[in-house]
Amino acid sequence: MEEPKPEAPAPEAESTPEPESKPAEAPKEETETVSVSLFSWPGYGFWFVAKEKGLTDGFDLDIKIIEDPYESFGLMSAGQLDVTSSTVEYGPIAAEEGVPVKLVSYTNASYGTDKILLGPGIEGGADLKGKSVAVLEGGLTQIYMGIFLEQNGVKFDEVSYVNVIMDDAVAAMVSGKVQGGEFWEPFGQQVLETLEGAKVASTSKDAYYQETGLLADGMYMSGSFLDGKPELAAKVMKAYFDAVAYWKANTAEANEIIAKAIQFDVKDVEAVIGADGGPKDGGLYVFGWPESSAFMGVTGGEPPVGKNGQIKDHWKLTNDWWVKFGVCKENHPPEAGIAFGPMKSLAESGYGK
């Protein structure tokens, strides 16, 4: 009988090394998102350049294309939108209605892109009396048409205004639904190429519009954004003007970015803002920081249209016309609808020097 073999000793348990303690990671700083809207127009496309080229400082841009500017203003009033680019005449309307939206900068001047067109058989402004004209009611196009009519002996209320966005305005003109209208490029050229007998009666390069700076675009911010995040508001404005500076130095690349974003052909973008970073004859004079801050009267120097601080005369002119049209009941002071804070903040920081 075999003797039992002794049991092998149990292996010693291996000691488990203590896990090395890792330094606690610093919490990541959240990047704020700023919501911006514009309608599909090359003069507003610099927001896409700012986003594409990383010109934002500690914030992201959420850019929406909204074709009706009054929808954008409504979203701003509801706190659902921070910034919008639109034509520059809305301030008195916002002041009249108590809408918490403020104009913060003048961003470009029309340099021929805006035109009054007449249909076949309409030889001059006087022939529009009793006829129908295409405008965007409550917008600069209506004021431009009113001034044009009165310069030609027709009272502003002796025509029928047909309220249409630009695509529909082209169709209304070509179909004969209206006998005249205010158009900007590239839509004006579409009418001229399509409708035999159509003609140009006035453009924004006429002396009156260059002296007043009436026909232009601007940047608006909501009251909640301006009051709640003033430092961010200044950063957003800086990003915009940095994008304009980038466009001036890299025009071909920037125009490609804008064309893709708003679904325009590059040639149509160039027809509006140009191909060399300078003023586009028949298009826009894009304002960089020096031009805009001078027009607003925040820095010295003379802007390309009007005089230093021209924005206050511009305000009065548009407010007067809104009273005539019945959109406003009274005149309001510029401070009721213009916020100079973001621009002054940038100027005090030395921006642009």
Image: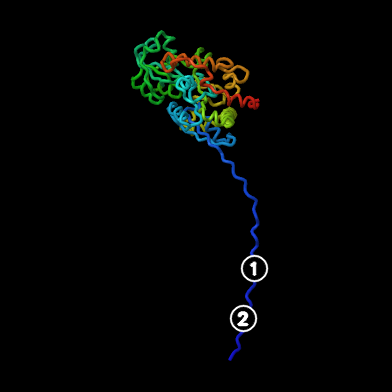
- Neighbourhood count class around disc 2 (C-alpha, 10 Å): few under 14, some 14–19, many 20 upward: few
Q: Seen in the image, is 142 located left or right of residue 253? A: left
Q: Which mark is residue 139?
A: none
Q: CA distance from mark 2 to mark 1?
A: 20 Å
Q: Position of residue 204 (x, y in %)?
A: 49, 17
Q: Seen in the image, is 162 located left or right of residue 336? A: left
Q: Seen in the image, is 222 located left or right of residue 57? A: left
Name which residue lies at 55% across and 33% down: 50
Q: Position of residue 352 (x, y in %)?
A: 63, 26
* Front residue (pair 179, 79): 79
Colour convention: rainbow
Q: Position of residue 220 (x, y in %)?
A: 51, 26
Residue 67 picture quarter? top left
- Neighbourhood count class around disc 1 (C-alpha, 10 Å): few under 14, some 14–19, many 20 upward: few
**Measured along the vertical axis of the image, is residue 202 above or below residue 63?**
above
Amino acid type assigned to the residue bearing label 1 in the image: Glu
Amino acid type assigned to the residue bearing label 2 in the image: Glu
Q: Which mark is residue 14?
A: 1
Residue 54 picture quarter? top right
Name which residue lies at 57% across and 32% down: 232
Quadrant assignment for the C terminus: top right
Mark 2 or mark 1: whose residue is earlier in sequence:
2
Residue wearing tag 2? 7
Q: Is residue 22 visible?
A: yes
- Under circle 1, the secondary element is loop
Pointer 2 and pointer 1: residues touching (CB < 8 Å)?
no
- Under circle 2, the secondary element is loop
Name which residue lies at 42% across and 9% down: 152
